[in-house]
Amino acid sequence: MAELRFHFGTMGSGKSTLALQIRHNLTGRGLDCLLITQLDRQEGRVSSRLGVSAEALILDHTVDLFRVISMEHLRGSGLHAVICDEAQFYEPRQIDQLARVVDELDIDVYAFGLLTSFQGELFPGTQRLLEMADIRSEIQVEARCWCGARATHNARLVNGRQVYDGELKVVGDTGNGDDAGSGASNEPAPVVTYDLRCRRHWLSEKVVHRQDPLFEDIPLSRE
């Protein structure tokens, strides 16, 4: 019986690497797999920070995944698995469509994504995966904060400064994030990057930027 499996972890935990490894193992056995993604770092491919990549179908938030996968399934000998990278960016209705793929087409679906956004809240797609998946599995490769503690949160930096507000879906290192301003400005577009933080240091930046008294006793020094 097919299953919907959700593998989650922080940035740098090896989500895309594991997705590509599963694809490699299945296709190596002669099984047909469909690799899909949204907002990946490399257009037209799923890419790992280790340098491996594979061609992928890039589908945006408007696409009916059940319809697309059904059409692919009818070609050739049929699909055995669908592998979904960057699943946190999928719409909740698309997660329901993936569940239909499992239940109605009997195709295994492997989804990989982040749990929380730079705001420290569940992505809508992630929340729906946690609600709908047959298997939920945290990737055990532990990424680290700059202090050496286990990283649990993803921080968005705009020109090196951590931010807590802005558009939810902004790919890092694009230089055209939600704080980029209007095209009429002569100033260079801000650079959007992401960094891993432990909870303590993800929260501590609020002292600097918001002077939140709730966190006033948290030391900011990196010494």
Image (cartoon, rainbow, N blue to C red):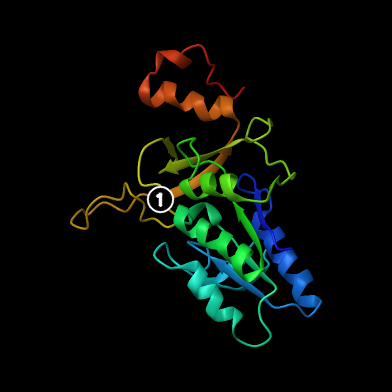
**Rendered location of residue 60, percent (x, y):** 43, 65
Q: Residue at x 68, y 41 (%)?
A: 143
Figure disc tally: 1
* Residue 200 or residue 105, whichever sits in front: 105
Q: Is residue 48 left or right of residue 193?
A: right
**Which image quarter: residue 1?**
bottom right
Q: Residue at x 50, y 68 (%)?
A: 65
Q: Is residue 107 above or below residue 212?
A: below
In the rendered structure, the answer to whether residue 209 lies left or right of residue 183 reads right
Q: Which residue is at the front of the view, 29 or 223?
A: 29
Question: Residue tagged by mark 1?
Answer: 191
Left or right for 187, reference 53: left
Circle 1 Cα neighbour tier, 10 Å, few/some/many (<14 / 14–19 / ≥20): some
Regarding residue 175, the answer to whether it shows in the image is yes
Depth check, front residue: 8 or 184? 8
Task: Tell me which residue sits at (69%, 85%) in the image.
Answer: 77
x then y, percent, for residue 164: 40, 35
Residue 125 percent location from the top left of the image: 50, 50
